Image (cartoon, rainbow, N blue to C red):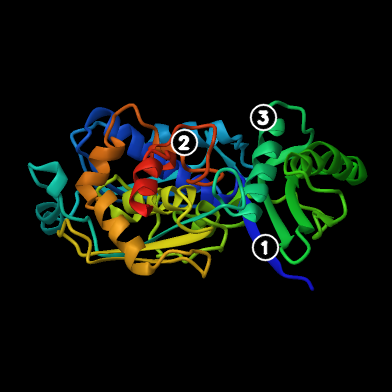
Amino acid sequence: MKKLFTSEAVSEGHPDKIADLIADKIVDACIKQDKNSHVACEVFLTEEYVLVGGEITSNAKVNYQKIVRDTLREIGYTNKKIGIGCDTCKIDIKIRKQSREINNAVSKKDLVNTGAGDQGIIFGYATDETKNYMPLAICMANDIVKLATKLRKQKKFLHARPDMKAQVTIDYGKNKIDNILISVQHDENINMNTFKDYIKKNIILPTTKKYHFSNDFDLLINPSGSFTIGGPKGDTGLTGRKLICDTYGGSAHQGGGAMSGKDPTKVDRSAAYYARYIAKNLVAAGVAKRLEVQIAYAIGVAKPLSISFLTFKTSKYSDEKINKIIEKVFDARPGAIIKSFNLNNPKFKYSDTTNYGHFGREEFNFPWEKLDKVKEIKQLLK
């Protein structure tokens, strides 16, 4: 019996991810100069146009126009024919200071007791189906677009343009890949058979081999046919619109708040990292094979309103015991999270998190991916 589950990933050239990356570059620029910066930045893109808006209270002097153009150039959007021109597009900046009422609620001399930057519900998730405790389908989908982008930037993936999407469907009933879908923006008037053959041999098959799967699956490459019109020329882009790609590929609930464009006092970001940290350490300690954590906050209040969890009937321990472990081991106050993960460190780059998922990233030493609570949890399980 087939038991299918699909996850999607997009490349850094997707319009929504362009918006996310610009927003996170602005967060980095603010915190680099002023670690106490409060940033809530939104970006909108369409053909030859970028709008940067939001609320920022910071002592930093930021050249927003330069960040936008440099980010577009870094991705590969150097010509309006490709999707948007880094040197030719119009840019509007609509930045104002953070609301005085919000600032008063959040700003505290004692960092640990800093109140949440907004109300909200946040989810974290972990599963033992992969070595990085992430769902398999989203890991594979991210690896596909990440490899395709790497080869494009190395000029090995000829005729590829920045905008790409991939979907991976896993058949959990047979423990195999059911199908893979990839769409890659490309130059005009190319040999599509050669293009598709390169994608299969150099991107898809190396990824499936990495995960020890056979080649017995359906493969769809650019099923719409021609895909020359991409980037902001093809679709508008907006910050925070790829949250499922950013997190667990649909395997877990999503609170709804964007992560990119926000400083760590915003629990949509920092608490999402901490919820992942809780879930990952609990699964790694053997508490459950799958575990989802939910944390709820009130604006201006440090202590979470609630912390709850689901184990999907994969745990031999009682909910009461697991709850006591969470209460004893983890401190989910926003200020405590910032301090524990050193999230206002000027050297930390939030733009490193933007593409190919905020979680399970082995190429970065993100603090929320550490398994430094496993030993303590195991002791409490005895």
Image-quadrant location for residue 124: bottom left
Quadrant containing the N terminus is bottom right
Residue type marked 3: Lys
Depth order, front residue of 335/104: 335
Q: Residues within 10 Å of mark 2 (few under 14, many from 20)?
A: some
Residue at image mark 1: 6
Mark 3 or 1, nearer chain start: 1
Give the image location of residue 246, x and y in percent: 51, 52
Q: Position of residue 172 (x, y in %)?
A: 71, 63
- Count of marks overlaid on the render: 3
What is the CA distance from the residue labelled 2 to the residue labelled 3? 17 Å
> What residue does disc 3 label?
153
Left or right: 334 with respect to 201?
left
Q: Residue at x 33, y 51 (%)?
A: 380
Disc 2, disc 3: CB below 8 Å? no
The label nearer to you, 2 versus 3, is: 2
Q: Secondary structure at mark 1?
A: strand
Amino acid type at image mark 1: Thr
Q: Is residue 250 above or below residue 25?
A: below
Asked if 382 appears above or below 366 in the picture, the reply is below
353, above or below 128, in the image:
above
Amino acid beneath label 2: Asp
Can I make out residue 40 in this image? yes
Which residue, given by chain and number where applicable, does mark 2 sit on? Answer: 352
User: Mark 1–mark 2 contact, CB under 8 Å?
Assistant: no
Which residue: 32% across, 68% down?
Answer: 320
Q: Tag 2's secondary structure? A: helix
In terms of secondary structure, where does tag 3 sit?
helix
- Residue lying at the far front of the rendered structure: 382
